Image (spheres, rainbow, N blue to C red):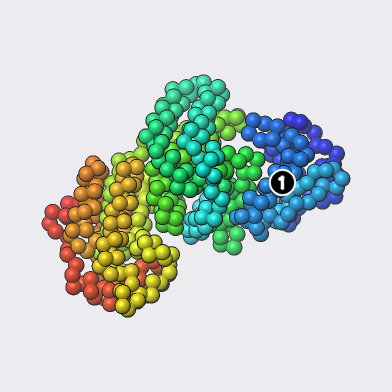
C-alpha cells in the first residue's frame, strides 16, 4: 500500500463511528475528537520501518504504548481494537496543539523555567532507561558513523547542486568522528547508550501543567532510539538554534549538564548536533522543501566552525550577583557555544546531593564546606573546565574565586590551551549583600550572612595584573 492510497473501508467506518477528524501523515492515520486521539499505522514497508503485516503493526502499537508511557503515562491511555478489522489503534488523551514547544517557542513563550523542567525530566528518564547490552551494535563507533555518512549520500543524490557544501560537511564529519572515536567507544563502555526517546525536537514536546512532557517516541526502528543520551539532547539543542534561539539553547545545555553532571558528553555534542541537522536537511529535501534544507545546511556549517573558546571565571563575595551575571553572559553567546559550571551545584554533586538539597552540615565534620571539600570542588571544576576547553567549548565557572591561587590555576588552564581568559568581577555594598543573602530562597547556594562575614576577613582582591582580564560591567 502506498502512503497516498485510498482509505480502507474499516477505517472509514471507524472514523464515522467516532465522529472524528482524520489527519494523514506519511506513515499513520490520526483520528481526532475533542478529547482523544487514535493513531493507526498504515500498512507500509519502507527502508526505515516495517508496518507490512497486521502482526507487525500490532507489535509496533504495543511498542509505542510501552515506550511513551515511560515519559507520558497521562497521555497514552491504551490500545483499542478497530471493530472487526484485526487492526488496533493507540488511544491518547488530546492536548492543545498550541502547547507544543515548537509553537510556544515560535510565539516567544518559551523560557528557562520550561527548559529547566525538560532538563530534569530528561536526566531522570535517561538515568532510568535501559542500557544497551555490551554485545549489541547500538552505540558502537561504526554504528554512529554509518548513518551520518548515509545522510550525505542521500542528499547528494537529491541536491547535486550542493555537492561542494556537502563535501565540506562530510569531511568535517569524518574528521570529527576520527578525532572522537575513543570517546564514542568510551560512551558505550560507560553505559551512556540507552533506550532513549529518539526524536526529541520541539514538536515532540508539550507543556502541560507547567511541566514539559516528551511524547511520540520512535517505536518503529530500534537503531534510532538506542542512542547516546548526548545525541538525544543534541537534537533539542540544535532545534533551538534552528529557531534562532541561541539563548535558550545555551540555557538548556547548561541546565542539563547541571542536572546530569555528564561532562563526558561535551566532546561529542557538536558531532551529534551536526548529524541531527543533516537528518533534518535530508527530510526537508525528501519533502520537496529546498529552503528548509538550505537552512539546515547553513546551521550545520555554523556548528562546524564554532568561535574560539574562552574560560571565564567569576569573582565576588556571596550575594554579589555572580550567578545572575554569569547567566546573562551564558545566554548572550550567539553561537550557544558556552557552558557553565556552578561550584554550588558541583560541590553538592561530589557529596551525592541534588542541587537544591540542603546539606545540613554535621557539626563535627563541618559538612560539605570544609577546606578539604572546597579543595576537591575546585579540583573537580578545573578538570571539567579543561575538558570542555579541549572539546572546543567556552566555559564559565561560577564560583567565588576569592583566593589568588584559585584564579591563577584557572588562568593557567586557559593559557595552556591557547584559550581566552576573562574575569567576571561582581560586587555590591555590604549592606546589600546581607540583604540579598537573608532573602535568598530556592538556590543551590547555601551561603549565609555568617559565611559572608568570614569571606570579608580573607578575600584576596584582584591584583593589578589581573585587572586586564576583567570584563566590562
Residue situated in front as seen by the camera: 191 or 38: 191
Residue situated in front as seen by the camera: 163 or 153: 153
Residue situated in front as seen by the camera: 382 or 250: 382
Q: Residue furthest left?
A: 464
Q: Is residue 418 left or right of residue 155?
A: left
Quarter of the image with the C terminus is: bottom left
State the image coordinates of residue 235 (x, y, percent, origin top left): 50, 44
Give the quarter of the image for residue 3.
top right
Q: Residue furthest bottom?
A: 363
Q: Residue at x 35, y 71 (%)?
A: 446
Q: Is residue 201 left or right of residue 254?
A: right
State the image coordinates of residue 177 (x, y, percent, origin top left): 42, 34
| Local SS, label 1 | helix
Q: Residue under label 1, please give it.
A: 61
State the image coordinates of residue 457 (x, y, percent, origin top left): 18, 73
Residue situated in front as seen by the camera: 36 or 145: 145
Q: Residue at x 18, y 70 (%)?
A: 458
Q: Residue at x 51, y 55 (%)?
A: 127
Q: Is residue 426 above or below residue 383?
A: below
Q: How many marks?
A: 1
Q: Residues within 10 Å of mark 1 (few under 14, many from 20)?
A: many
Q: Does residue 75 appear anywhere in the picture? A: yes
Q: Residue at x 41, y 27 (%)?
A: 171
State the image coordinates of residue 54 (x, y, percent, origin top left): 78, 39
Amino acid at each position: 500500500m502506498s502512503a497516498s492510497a485510498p482509505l480502507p473501508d474499516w477505517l472509514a467506518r471507524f472514523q464515522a463511528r467516532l465522529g472524528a477528524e482524520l489527519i494523514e501523515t506519511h506513515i499513520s492515520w490520526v483520528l481526532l475528537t475533542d478529547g482523544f486521539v487514535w493513531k493507526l499505522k498504515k500498512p507500509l514497508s519502507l527502508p526505515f520501518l516495517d508496518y507490512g503485516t497486521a502482526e507487525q503493526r500490532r507489535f509496533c502499537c504495543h511498542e509505542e504504548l510501552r515506550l511513551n508511557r515511560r515519559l507520558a503515562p497521562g497521555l497514552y491511555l491504551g490500545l483499542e481494537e478497530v471493530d472487526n478489522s484485526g487492526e488496533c489503534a493507540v488511544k491518547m488523551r488530546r492536548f492543545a496543539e498550541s502547547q507544543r514547544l515548537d509553537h510556544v517557542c515560535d510565539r516567544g513563550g518559551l523560557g528557562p523555567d520550561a527548559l529547566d523542567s525538560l532538563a530534569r525530566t530528561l536526566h531522570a528518564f535517561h538515568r532510568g532507561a535501559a542500557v544497551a547490552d555490551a554485545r549489541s551494535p547500538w552505540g558502537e563507533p561504526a554504528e554512529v558513523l554509518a548513518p551520518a555518512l548515509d545522510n550525505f549520500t542521500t542528499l547528494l543524490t537529491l541536491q547535486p547542486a550542493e555537492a561542494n557544501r556537502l563535501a565540506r560537511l562530510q569531511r568535517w564529519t569524518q574528521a570529527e568522528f576520527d578525532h572522537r572515536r575513543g570517546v564514542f567507544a568510551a560512551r558505550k563502555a560507560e553505559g551512556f547508550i540507552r533506550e532513549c526517546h529518539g526524536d526529541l525536537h520541539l514538536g515532540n514536546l508539550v507543556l502541560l501543567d507547567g511541566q514539559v512532557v516528551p511524547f511520540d517516541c520512535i517505536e518503529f526502528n530500534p537503531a534510532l532510539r538506542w542512542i547516546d543520551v548526548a545525541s538525544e539532547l543534541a537534537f533539542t539543542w540544535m532545534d533551538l538554534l534552528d529557531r534562532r534561539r541561541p539563548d535558550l539553547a545555551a540555557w538548556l545545555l547548561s541546565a542539563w549538564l547541571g542536572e546530569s553532571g555528564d561532562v563526558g558528553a561535551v566532546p561529542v555534542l557538536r558531532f551529534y548536533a551536526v548529524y541531527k541537522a543533516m537528518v533534518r536537511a535530508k527530510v526537508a529535501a525528501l519533502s520537496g522543501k529546498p529552503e528548509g534544507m538550505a537552512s539546515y545546511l547553513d546551521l550545520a556549517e555554523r556548528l562546524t566552525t564554532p568561535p574560539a573558546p574562552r574560560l571565564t571565571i567569576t569573582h565576588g563575595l556571596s550575594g554579589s550577583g555572580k550567578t545572575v551575571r554569569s547567566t546573562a553572559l551564558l545566554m548572550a553567546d550567539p553561537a550557544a557555544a558556552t557552558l557553565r559550571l556552578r561550584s554550588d551545584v558541583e560541590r553538592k554533586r561530589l557529596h551525592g546531593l541534588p542541587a537544591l538539597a540542603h546539606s545540613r552540615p554535621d557539626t563535627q565534620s563541618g559538612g560539605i564546606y570544609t577546606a578539604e571539600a572546597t579543595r576537591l570542588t575546585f579540583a573537580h571544576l578545573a578538570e571539567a573546565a579543561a575538558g570542555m576547553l579541549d572539546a572546543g567549548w567556552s566555559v564559565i565557572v561560577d564560583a567565588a574565586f576569592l583566593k589568588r591561587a584559585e584564579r591563577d590555576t584557572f588562568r593557567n588552564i586557559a593559557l595552556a590551551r591557547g584559550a581566552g581568559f576573562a574575569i567576571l568581577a561582581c560586587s555590591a555594598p555590604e549592606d546589600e549583600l546581607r540583604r540579598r543573602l537573608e532573602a535568598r530562597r530556592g538556590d543551590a547556594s547555601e551561603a549565609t550572612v555568617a559565611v559572608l562575614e568570614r569571606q570579608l576577613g580573607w578575600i584576596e582582591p584582584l591584583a593589578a595584573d589581573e585587572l586586564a582580564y576583567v570584563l566590562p560591567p
